[in-house]
Image (cartoon, helix red, strand yellow):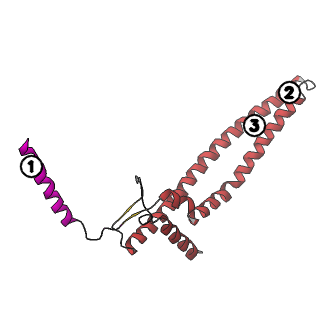
């Protein structure tokens, strides 16, 4: 038991001595809340507007189709007693076809939007990563952390600094 304590103590002291030699004198660590940066970056707003302009017409078309389905359903319900059987069947067939079309187009819209949104998000992540690396190099950070952080004080949290850099980059590209 005593020998075990001596060995553990010796290993601990050795690690402390070697560890203190290996660490640089000034270790500068920063933390970035990447989720906040992506949500608030001006480049994110630009990407959102780009997506809205690209998918806006299709979205309006889907809303029009939904409206047509609703009005056709209302028409069938209101005129149920006065409509001929053949006309009713034809309207029901039209309604069924329209619902299928709406469902298919909605699915395609969601898939296409998701793919494009992910493309834009990847591009934004590259821009954010580049800004963080530039800040790390220019401000002599040894380490910048962005995930798995339980606490970061105001001195280590450089999120606002990254947002300002992204805003400046955005202003420079206009």
Q: Is residue 127 above or below residue 58?
A: below
Task: Please tell me which residue is depicted at 36% across the width and 69% down the height of the picture.
Answer: 141
* Nearest to viewer (mark 1 / mark 3): 1
Comparing 53 with 33, the one in front is 33
Q: Which residue is mark 1?
A: 7
For marks 2 and 1, the one nearer the N-term is: 1
Task: Please tell me which residue is depicted at 42% across the width and 71% down the height of the picture.
Answer: 135
Task: Indicate which disc residue 98 carries.
Answer: 3
Screen quadrant of the C terminus: bottom right
Q: Which residue is mark 2?
A: 88
Question: What kind of element bears circle 2?
Answer: helix
For marks 2 and 3, the one nearer the N-term is: 2
Question: What kind of element bears circle 1?
Answer: helix
| Left or right of 62 on screen, residue 44 | left
- The segment highlighted magenta reads 1-28
Q: Are marks 2 and 1 in contact (CB under 8 Å)?
A: no
Q: Residue 85 at what x, y percent from top left? A: 87, 23
Image quarter of residue 1: top left
* Nearest to viewer (mark 2 / mark 1): 1
């Amino acid at each position: 038991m005593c020998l075990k304590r001596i060995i553990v103590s010796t290993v601990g002291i050795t690690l402390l001595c070697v560890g203190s030699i290996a660490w640089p004198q000034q270790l500068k660590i920063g933390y970035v809340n990447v989720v906040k940066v992506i949500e608030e970056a001006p480049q994110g707003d630009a990407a959102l507007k780009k997506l809205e302009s690209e998918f806006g017409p299709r979205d309006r078309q889907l809303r029009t189709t939904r409206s047509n389905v609703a009005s056709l359903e209302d028409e069938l319900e209101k005129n149920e007693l006065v409509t001929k059987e053949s006309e009713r069947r034809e309207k029901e067939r039209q309604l069924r076809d329209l619902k299928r079309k709406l469902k298919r187009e909605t699915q395609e819209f969601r898939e296409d939007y998701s793919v494009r949104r992910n493309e834009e998000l990847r591009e934004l992540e590259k821009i954010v990563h580049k800004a963080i690396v530039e800040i790390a190099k220019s401000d002599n950070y040894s380490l910048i952390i962005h995930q798995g952080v339980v606490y970061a004080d105001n001195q280590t949290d450089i999120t606002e600094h990254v947002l300002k850099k992204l805003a400046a980059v955005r202003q420079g590209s206009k």
